[in-house]
Amino acid sequence: MVELTWQLMMGCGLAASAGLRAFLPLLVVGLAGRFEFVALGERFTWMSTDAALIVFAVAVVIEVLGDKIPLVDHALDVGGTFARPIAGALAAASPLTTMDPLTASVVGVILGATVAGGVHAAKAGTRILSTGGTAGLATPMISATEDALSLGTALISLFLPVVTFALALSILYLLYRGRRGRPVKA
């Protein structure tokens, strides 16, 4: 039970990372699987193959560089509306070795797609405001911050998933507390 809890926390953190950058956590998971830092589920060992790692690496370069350019970043966010929940599902399901592959896939879709989609929605909303407020001048700086957050979250999720989970709970609490007491606008 402890191992399953650990794996679920890991998957949740990886999915959150995928909400910022679709392919970065997949590359991190694939490399971690390749170098046996993390065991990948039965149906997810393909993520550590040469072909998958090359595709993930090329996609990371395109996503990271493209996201620094105003307007291109919005096009990536539109595509990310579909790609990031899928990446989140893959990232969340990949470390679930204590479940049968079908159950791991279903849990990955439910947990990973939801978490990644939520993070992506929050990120996209913030980006629209920042682009409007700075005429796109802040885009590269915000994008670099998101790159670091995505990479850091993915790495912490692999090696200390309880830290990522605790941070997520803290953020949810702060968001809830910040919303409490505000009148609902019609």
Image: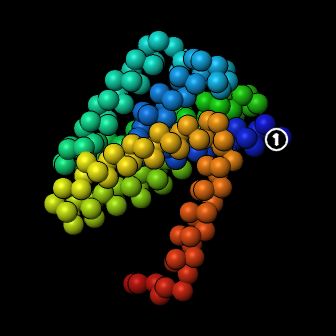
Q: Position of residue 29 (x, y in %)?
A: 55, 28
> In percent of the image, x 59 and y 41: which residue is there?
156
Question: Are there few (<14), some (14-19), or many (20+) residues within 10 Å of tag 1?
Answer: few
Q: Position of residue 42 (x, y in %)?
A: 67, 20
Q: Position of residue 129 (x, y in %)?
A: 28, 64
Residue occupying the far left of the picture? 135
> In percent of the image, x 32 and y 52: which residue is there?
142
In the picture, residue 110 is in which quadrant?
top right
The relative height of residue 120 versus residue 79 in the rendered view (above or below) is below
> In percent of the image, x 65 and y 26: which residue is there?
38
> In percent of the image, x 46 and y 53: which residue is there?
119
Badge 1 amino acid: Val
Residue occupying the far top of the picture? 50
60 relative to 175 in the view: left or right: left
SS at mark 1? helix
Q: Is residue 15 visible?
A: no
Q: Which residue is mark 1?
A: 2
Q: Position of residue 68 (x, y in %)?
A: 24, 43
145 relative to 37 in the view: left or right: left
Numbered disc total: 1
Q: How is the image coloured?
A: rainbow
In the foreground, 17 or 155: 155
Picture quarter with the N terminus: top right
The relative height of residue 86 versus residue 146 in the rendered view (above or below) is above
The relative height of residue 30 versus residue 20 in the rendered view (above or below) is above
In the picture, residue 160 is in which quadrant?
top right
